[in-house]
Image (tube, grey):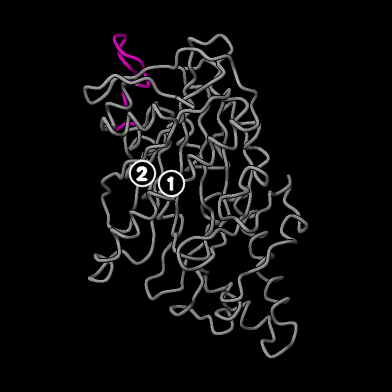
């Protein structure tokens, strides 16, 4: 039986496209993309819309880009996440083995500013997002006067990340812990469930995947493969350590041309993010026998710090704009990564879509 969270998403999912218009056109119309957006798509660029959200701490974006490569080629490239993420402001990255091993995090090192902040880290007053137990481990398990304090602190963080992934693989969301860096402690699992229940219409209903996201490791749908990775990313003023769970869901029946859905769920972030989820829908061009191109829809939802109160009301538009630009930049990075490794196909008429009263052909290279 579907959980309440998945049902909440089902209430708002989009209906299948009518026979009189393509599925891609119906989604573009549903998202109210403008004529300028469609022209950008036709020119081969990514477009992103900022979505309204129920709480100020939440940011959400719906993006789209056309990719000249088979969806299966994208999935194959994305499995090699360490190579795929190169060039996106990701100075460090590593994929976890199955099962996770200490060697998977051996190259992880914290930025110098984080190491300095950990020395005085306490519940309610910490530069990093951590549970109180981890703060205590850094305070008592590291001699901060020692010349090897940085090395010892990095060892502690590697152990923290490794234990998190192992415990999550066993207990699911219950292992995500509580961020206690501020006075108002924030359970990550609560924030993630709230993120799910505040959903936006999906391009295609995938209730079984939504249930798995919430109930992992239980109720795995057939056709889902998953993997875990960590990364240090350049975001805002601070480099941020993130740990992510990737689910790749293959849909053999290809409803409305959707061949795959990829979900990327945040398990941990050292700064800024309470939780986040990105859903990517791969819509193949079924008029092409080789299915050698596809339309990518991306729905991203994030809950973050610093967007409440007077200061937050001033900062939120800036953060939202920068985040939207980051989403657009990443969509275009994905396009480049996949197209550069895919042999060019013979020139044909590009697929067309109609929305906002404008008829355009998307996918110009």
Q: Position of residue 357 (x, y in %)?
A: 21, 22
The residue pinned by badge 1 equals: 327
Q: Which residue corresponds to the image point at 37% horizontal and 17% vertical from the top-left? A: 352
User: Which of 126/318 is in front?
Assistant: 318
Q: Please tell me which residue lies in front, 137 or 31.
A: 31
Image spot of residue 233 (x, y percent): 56, 58
Label 1 neighbourhood size at 10 Å, few (<14), some (14-19), many (20+)? many
Magenta stretch: dominant secondary structure: loop
Q: How many marks are shown on the rendered structure?
A: 2
The answer to whether the residues at label 1 and label 2 have Cβ atoms under 8 Å apart is: yes
Mark 2, Cα crowd under 10 Å, few <14 / some 14-19 / many 20+, is: many
Note whether 53 is above or below 222 in the view shown.
Answer: below
**Residue drawn at (76%, 54%) of the image:** 101
The stretch drawn in magenta includes residue 286: no
Observer-nearest residue: 60 or 65?
65
Residue linked to disc 2: 61
Question: Residue at (38%, 41%) from the top-left corner?
Answer: 5
């Amino acid at each position: 039986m579907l959980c309440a969270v998945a049902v909440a998403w089902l209430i708002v999912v989009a209906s299948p496209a009518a026979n009189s218009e393509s599925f891609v056109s119906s989604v573009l119309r549903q998202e109210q993309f403008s004529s300028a957006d469609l022209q950008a798509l036709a020119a081969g660029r990514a477009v992103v819309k900022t979505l309204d959200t129920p709480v100020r701490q939440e940011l959400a974006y719906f993006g789209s880009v056309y990719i000249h490569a088979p969806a299966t080629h994208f999935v194959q490239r994305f499995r090699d996440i360490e190579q795929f993420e190169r060039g996106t402001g990701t100075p460090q990255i590593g994929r976890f083995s199955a099962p996770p091993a200490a060697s998977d995090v051996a190259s992880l090192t914290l930025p110098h500013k984080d190491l300095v902040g950990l020395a005085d880290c306490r519940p309610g007053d910490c530069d990093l997002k951590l549970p109180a137990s981890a703060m205590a481990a850094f305070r008592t398990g590291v001699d901060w006067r020692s010349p090897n304090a940085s090395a010892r602190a990095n060892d502690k963080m590697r152990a923290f990340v490794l234990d998190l992934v192992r415990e999550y693989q066993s207990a699911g969301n219950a292992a995500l812990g509580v961020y206690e860096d501020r006075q108002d402690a924030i359970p990550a699992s609560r924030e993630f469930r709230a993120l799910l229940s505040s959903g936006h219409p999906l391009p295609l209903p995938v209730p079984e995947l939504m249930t798995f996201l919430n109930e992992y490791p239980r109720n795995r749908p057939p056709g889902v493969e998953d993997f875990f990775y960590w990364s240090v990313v350049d975001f805002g003023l601070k480099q941020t350590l993130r740990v992510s769970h990737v689910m790749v869901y293959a849909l053999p029946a290809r409803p409305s041309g959707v061949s795959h859905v990829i979900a990327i769920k945040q398990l941990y972030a050292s700064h800024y993010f309470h939780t986040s989820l990105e859903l990517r829908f791969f819509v193949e061009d079924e008029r092409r026998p080789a299915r050698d191109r596809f339309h990518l829809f991306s729905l991203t939802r994030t809950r973050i710090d610093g967007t409440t109160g007077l200061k937050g009301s001033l900062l939120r538009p800036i953060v939202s704009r920068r985040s939207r630009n980051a989403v657009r930049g990443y969509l275009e990075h994905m396009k480049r990564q996949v197209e550069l490794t895919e042999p060019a196909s013979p020139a044909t008429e590009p697929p067309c879509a109609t929305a906002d009263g404008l008829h355009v052909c998307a996918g110009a290279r």
